[in-house]
Image: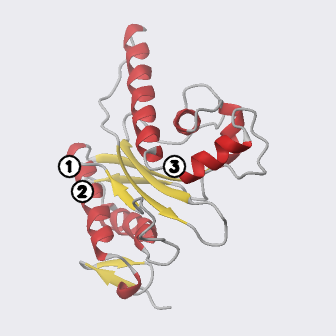
Amino acid sequence: MKDDTYQGLLIQGAIEDNNTSYLDRLLSTMNNALGEHSRTYAIRVDLRLPNIDDNLDCLSRDEIVSYNRNRTNIIKRFTESLNSKIQAQAQRKRREGKRVYPCSMRYVWAKERDTSINDHYHVVLFFNKDRFYQAGGYKRGGSLASLIIEAWASALSCEFEDVFRLVYFPPNHGYYLNENSEDYLSQYEDLFYRISYLAKKRTKHYGEGSRCFGCSNR
């Protein structure tokens, strides 16, 4: 299927197959991030809910069923936990006398369900590139990747080791945007094309009592 454009930017698929309100909010979140941090790092991550047959010590079968029936605030819990961990890390570094760059986290997310019985979440997180410039190692140790996994574990009320495989960093998950770079336009276009995937209508299930898309409020 031929790719289309939105506000002059290439998107994945035809415009009628995408939710233009979602595209607008994706663009707005990108611009808000760049408005505060002229050097922005964006990272794509997929967050999965546990299946009934997953062997998680932290959740019983009934608890897994409950999570999958009542997950209205799970992304809110995730983003609040991640932001709290980032701020706590900054405070520790300041106490150690280390320089810490300011960083306002922004995000967009889309809830989807295709062939699986469970929903999954596509998430894009935006940071000050001077603070975070890569995912880093996926194990504990203060890397961005480990903070993300810890935050998802917190949202699920599980331990880090129990949800490690529920967090997926896809290939080419990191993007740099530098307003002062000669490659800025291509960086901007490439990122918007990548994240426009979150606006596609297919695999979204409306009318089930919970939102399919969300983003930062500023």
Q: Residue at x 25, y 52 (%)?
A: 180
Q: Is residue 168 left or right of residue 132?
A: right
- Report the front residue among 106 and 34: 106
**Which mark identifies residue 217?**
none
x then y, percent, for residue 59: 69, 37
Mark yes or no: residue 99 visible: yes
Residue type, mark 3 in image:
Asn
Marks 2 and 1 close (CB-CB < 8 Å): yes
Residue type, mark 1 in image:
Gly
In the depicted structure, whether residue 139 falls above or below residue 45: above
In the depicted structure, whether residue 25 falls above or below residue 53: below
Q: Quadrant of residue 128?
A: top left
Tag 3 secondary structure? loop
Q: CA distance from mark 2 to mark 1?
A: 6 Å
Nearer the observer, disc 1 or disc 3? 3
Q: CA distance from mark 1 to mark 3?
A: 35 Å
Which residue is tagged 3? Answer: 70
Q: Is residue 115 left or right of residue 41?
A: right
Tag 1 secondary structure? helix
Which residue is tagged 1? Answer: 35
Residue type, mark 2 in image:
Asn
Q: Residue at x 44, y 77 (%)?
A: 201
x then y, percent, for residue 64: 66, 45
Which residue is tagged 2? Answer: 31
Mark 3 or mark 2, earlier in chain: 2
Mark yes or no: residue 47 visible: no
